[in-house]
Every structure is written in structure tokens, then in C-alpha cells.
Amino acid sequence: MNAPVKTTKLIKGATGDFEVIVGMEVHAQVTSNAKLFSGASAAFGGAPNSHVSLVDAAMPGMLPVINEECVRQAIRTGLGLKAQINLESVFDRKNYFYPDLPQGYQISQYKSPIVGEGEVVVDMPDGETVRVGIERLHLEQDAGKSLHDQHPSMSFVDLNRSGVALMEIVSRPDIRSAEEAKAFVAKLRTIMRYLGTCDGNMEEGSLRADVNVSVRRPGEPLGTRCEIKNVNSLRFIGQAIEVEARRQIEIIEDGGAIVQETRLFDPGRGETRSMRNKEEAHDYRYFPDPDLLPLVFDQAYVDALAAALPELPDAKKARFMADYGLSAYDADVLVAERETAAFFESVVERGAGARRDPKLAANWVINELAGRLNKEGHGIAESPVSADQLGAVLDLIADGTISGKIAKDLFEIVWSEGGDPKAIVEARGMKQVTDTGAIAAAIDEVIAKNPDKAAQAKEKPAMVGWFVGQVMKASGGKANPQAVNALLKSKLGLE
């Protein structure tokens, strides 16, 4: 699964170039009503310790019971990653002490995970395709949360998150830049949101990443890695990698050696700092959990889940390019969110086999609609302009009723006030002027007022653009631009 070594993304040090090597451990909270081994709610929020069962609190004699929905979601995610699904897996105890881990161990998977090797294909903005190998996906329970700012002399513990199901997705060290790392996590997030296996909400902690960073001179063996824990935004992932890579390069160039350790990223100070020496597997004393039997299912179970998967981002992107003639960039933007892709298709497909111009629809969805939504901090589900309304605006452009400029004014009205675009155009007199006689009269008036510019236009044909602007202004933006352009060229003797 290892991608070929890339030497194009090098970091310049004082003594030469270095290559950054990145591997990711992404923790994704499973979309499920209940926790992994108890019936307590897995919902975000709630009063402290209100979503806690006796199992989560590690009361004596309480035994874990596997939540089948979490198993289904892990398998579906593995299928979305084109990964090997292991029909038998084992839950282990990972032993370590922390105040918000009531059992004194975490139930996880070690040698026998539920999902094996897979791959994520990442299309970069510059056109490069990066293939990131997936080493494994395993199920494990989350820990609780320690609160250190609630009391001057004590820390509080909230166990609402204790026992919530996580998928830990471990990549190969195939990533070679901060931008690739951000794109990889974004693509992983998109896949899981399409599948409905994780909501990907990084602000709420349902998707976070441990980032393993090392550097080496091109062609040399892999360097010693440091792990940056719990990075919870794409922007911080990129910043943490760049800061840590630079720190390691400076140590090496000063003749020092990198110590394998766990570090934290401080975005306020723009630095990583040591948290603890990196533990190895033997430090955790893994052993199979005696309270849980091996997890076993058959291929028919996996096949049934595979058959019910939705169309995933890569397949949807390929279809948008093939069926709608979209560019790779436009298709990438549209499929990044499942809801945006569905909105676009609702705009394009008129029903009964009829179809609007896909490229025009993509332009309006990406630039006008998404641009406005981003500006106001809304998602596509909160759009005040529906797919039917936007489709109606495009129909009015296509049949020549309104110009592109009028369409933008109409979009503003629909955004702010709602209503049927066609009825708004009728009621407010927004129709495009296509009467060549009226357009010719406006052109004659502009030429008469600017005889010097009309004479110059014969020497500099590009000046016709200035005249088009003046005529459009005189018509209040209602004149048909194509008719204006054609008549102007004729009257200025540019044909």
C-alpha cells in the first residue's frame, strides 16, 4: 500500500533539503444512539455525567455488551475505504491509568482489528493524485473528560463521553506535506459523512487526529517520529506538521537527535511541546478482554452491507465529469458534501429526462449560492434559496427572459424575500430587452455623445467593451448583451 517516495515537496534547511513524512491516526466517533458496550446515550452534550451507565462508570460486576450498530458502522466505513474486512476480530484491554478512565483500561483492538488494509485516493488542487494506504481500522471506546478549570484545588471528571464508540483509522506513512495531510483528513471526513458513519464535527470532538511527523534527507531511511496528539481542525493539522517538521530539522542540523515522544500543538504560540515519552505496545500490556468473545460474522453479512452503500465521493465525481461534462475542480467542490451534490443534481435534472445546462448550474451552485452561504456561515441545508428556485432562475437565463446581471439581482431578491422567480420578474418588470430597435436607439445615443471614442474604436476594437458597458448602464442592465455587442460592432464599423 505504500505510495512511491515523493521528493518534490521538500523543506529547505540551513544545510540542505529535507522531506517530511506524515502518518495519521484519525479518531472518528461512530454515529450511533448508544455507546459501544452499554445502552447509555452517545449524544453530544448533556449535563455532566448524565449519559453514564453502570458499565461506563466501571461499577463492580458490570459486563460490557457489544453494540451491533457500531459493528455495522465500522464495517461500512471499511468498505468505503476499499479495505479488507476481517470476519473475526478480537477486543483487547489497553492498560493505562488516567482519572477519566474508570476501568483503568480501554477496551480496544490490537492484533486482530475489524478492518485491515485499504486505501484513500486524494485529489490535490494542483491535479496530483495522492494514494494514502490505510493500515487498519479498529473499534475502541472513548475515555471521559477531565475538567481542570471548575475549582481552584480540584479537577472534575465528566464521564458522558466514556464508552462512546470510536473508529481509529491508521494510515501508512504515505503523506509528504501539510497540504496532503489536510486533504487526506478532509477526504476521510467526506467519505464517512456520505456513509453516515461519523458526523465529522471536529468542533465537538467527533473527529480528531493524532499526527505522526518525522523528517529525513531525501533518499535516507525514515527518521524518528513524534506524535502530536488530539489535533481537532484541518487548519491546526497543517500548522502542527509545519511547526514540528521545522523543529526537527533545526535539531538535526544542530547535531542533535530526535527523541520519540508524544507532543501537543499550541496554536496560540505556534509551537509543539513535549507531553510524555512515546509509549510502545508493551507499555500498555495488551491482552484479550476476558469479558468479550471474539467478534465473528460471515461474508454474507458484509455483502449485504456493501450492497446497501450509497454512491461514494469518487464514484460521484467520476459520474459528474462523465455525465455532466464538469471539470475535475468543479466536480470535486460539488461532491465534497453529500448535500451539496444532491442540491446540484436537483437543479440540473428537471424531470422527465429534461436537463438544465450542467456547467451553468455548477457555476451558480459553487459561486453564487455556496459563496453566499459561506459568507453568512450557513450550510446548504439552511439555504433560503431552494433547488427549484435556483433552477427557475437558470430557466429565465436560458430562454433569454433575463440577462446574467439581472439574474444576480433576482437571486438577491429570492434570497431575501423568497417567492417564485418567474413571478418576481413579471411583477417587477425585470425582463431583458431584446427589441433590437430599442437597443439600436440606445446605441445611437451613446455613440452620439462620444464621437471621439467612436472614432478611436476603429483603431482599437477592444474599446467596444466600453460601449457595451455604457449601453447596458443606460438600459438598467436589461438589454440583451449579445444583441448589444453585435449591433455595436455593426454601427462602429468593426465587422
Image: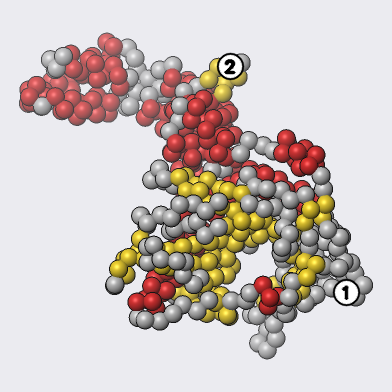
Which residue shows up at 28% across the image and 16% down it? 483
Q: Position of residue 400 (x, y in %)?
A: 40, 17
Q: Secondary structure at mark 2?
A: loop
Which residue shows up at 7% across the image and 24% down it? 459
Q: Position of residue 495 (x, y in %)?
A: 16, 14
Q: Does residue 309 lie above or below 187 as drawn?
A: above
Give the side of residue 225 with respect to residue 87, left or right: left
Instruction: Mark 1 vs mark 2: give the one in front.
Output: 1
Question: Which of these two is toward me, 332 or 24?
Answer: 24
Where on the picture, by quarter, is residue 157? bottom right
Q: Position of residue 123 (x, y in %)?
A: 47, 44
Q: Does residue 213 lie above or below 405 as drawn?
A: below
Q: Secondary structure at mark 1?
A: loop
Give the amino acid at mark 1. Answer: Met
Q: Is residue 377 visible?
A: no
Which residue shows up at 41% across the image and 45% down it? 128
Which residue shows up at 23% across the image and 25% down it? 468
Q: Position of residue 414 (x, y in %)?
A: 51, 33
The tag earlier along the polypeptide, 1 or 2, is 1
Tell me how far mark 1 sits from mark 2, CA to CA: 61 Å
Q: Which residue is mark 1?
A: 59
Give the side of residue 211 with respect to residue 68, left or right: left
Question: Which of these two is toward me, 420 or 174?
Answer: 174
Q: Which residue is mark 2?
A: 353
Question: Which of these two is toward me, 79 or 199?
Answer: 79
Give the amino acid at mark 2. Answer: Gly
